[in-house]
Amino acid sequence: METTERCHGIDAKDLSLVPDLVLPYKFKMSNFKKYNGTTCPEAHITIFCRRMTGYVNNDQLLIHCFQDSLTGAASKWYNQLSRARISSWRDLAQVFMKQYSHVVEMVPDRITLQNMEKKSNEGFRQYAQRWREVAVQVQPPLLEREMTMPFVNTLKAPFIIYMLGSATKNFSDIVMSGEMIESAIRSGKIDVGENNRSLHILNGTENLLPNHTDAGVNMVGEGTGKKVKENIAEVKIPLRRVWKEMMKRWLIVSDLVRGGETQNYCDFHHEVGHEIQRCGKSRAWIRA
C-alpha cells in the first residue's frame, strides 16, 4: 500500500491563523458566549473584548481565542479564513462585521417583541428568558421598567388575565408570578377554558347577555317597580357584569343613583348589605 509522509492541507502550522503564537504564562481560556450568526456582531465583539481584558494588546491571542466564541455557521466561517487576509485583530474584526452586516439590519425592535408569543410546549420561565434575550437587543435599549408591560401583553389567557392589573415594574417578579400561575394550571386550580372565555369578555368579543331565539329583549324600565320581558335565557356569568351590560345597552333604565362600586352593594336593591351575585331575588328576576 502506497503511503505518503505528508498530506497537503493538514499541517498544523499552515492551518493556524497565528502559528507563532506563544500563550501567556498561566493563561486560561475564558468560557465565551457563543455567536451563531443570528445576533448583532458588534455586540458580540464588545462582549468578547471585555472578556479578554488584560490581553487586548495581544493581537495573536485575540485572533486565536475568537474562534472559541463562535459556533455553528459562524465557526465554519472562521475555519475558512486564510492567514493572507488576517494579519491583525482589526483585520479579523472588520471581516467579521462585514460577514454579518446583514444581521445588524435585522436587529429586533419593539414590534418584534410585540409579535412574540409563548409556545404551547414552552415553560413560562423559558419563554420569559427567550423574550428578554431579544429585548436586550432592541435599540434604543429598553429600561427595566419598560420591559414588563410589553412582555405581559404578549401573553395569552390565563396568564394575561391574572397579570394585567399588576403594578410591578420588576421583570423577575413577573416571571415568578407566571410560574405560580403555571403551577396552578398544572394542579387544576386554574381552569384554562374558563379563563379563555373571560378574556373574550374583557376584549368585548363575547356577548355578556345570552342569545335568544325570539325577537329579542325589549327595554325594561326600572323605578319603584321592576318589569322584565319573559323567557330570558339562563345567565351563567357574574350578575353584576350582566346588570351593568343591560344598563349599558338600555335594556334596563334606572332612575336611582347606583353605587355599584361599593363593597357589598346590591345593584338590584340599591342598598348595602350583600352583593348582587348573592342576591336570590335579582337572579330570579333576571331569569323570570
Image (tube, rainbow, N blue to C red):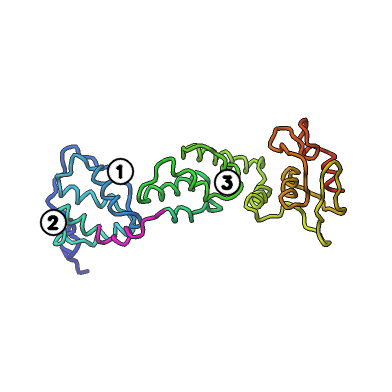
> Relative to 49, is 275 on the left or the right?
right
Q: Name which residue type carries label 1.
A: Asn
Name the residue beneath numbered marker 1: 31
Percent across and percent down for residue 183 are: 59, 40
Disc number for residue 160: 3
Can you tell which quarter of the image residue 211 is in? bottom right
> Which sits earlier in the primary sequence, circle 3 or circle 1?
1
Identify the residue at horizontal 52%, vertical 51% (top origin).
118
Disc on res. 17: none
* Marks 2, 1: nearer the viewer: 2
* Magenta region: 97-109
Work out whether mark 3 precedes mark 2 in sequence or the reverse, and give the earlier one.
2
Which residue is labeled 2 in the image? 87
| Disc 3 element | helix
23 above or below 107? Answer: above
Q: Nearer the viewer, residue 260 or 61?
A: 260
Disc 2 residue type (three-letter): Ser
Q: Position of residue 4 (x, y in %)?
A: 17, 66
Whether residue 108 is in magenta: the answer is yes
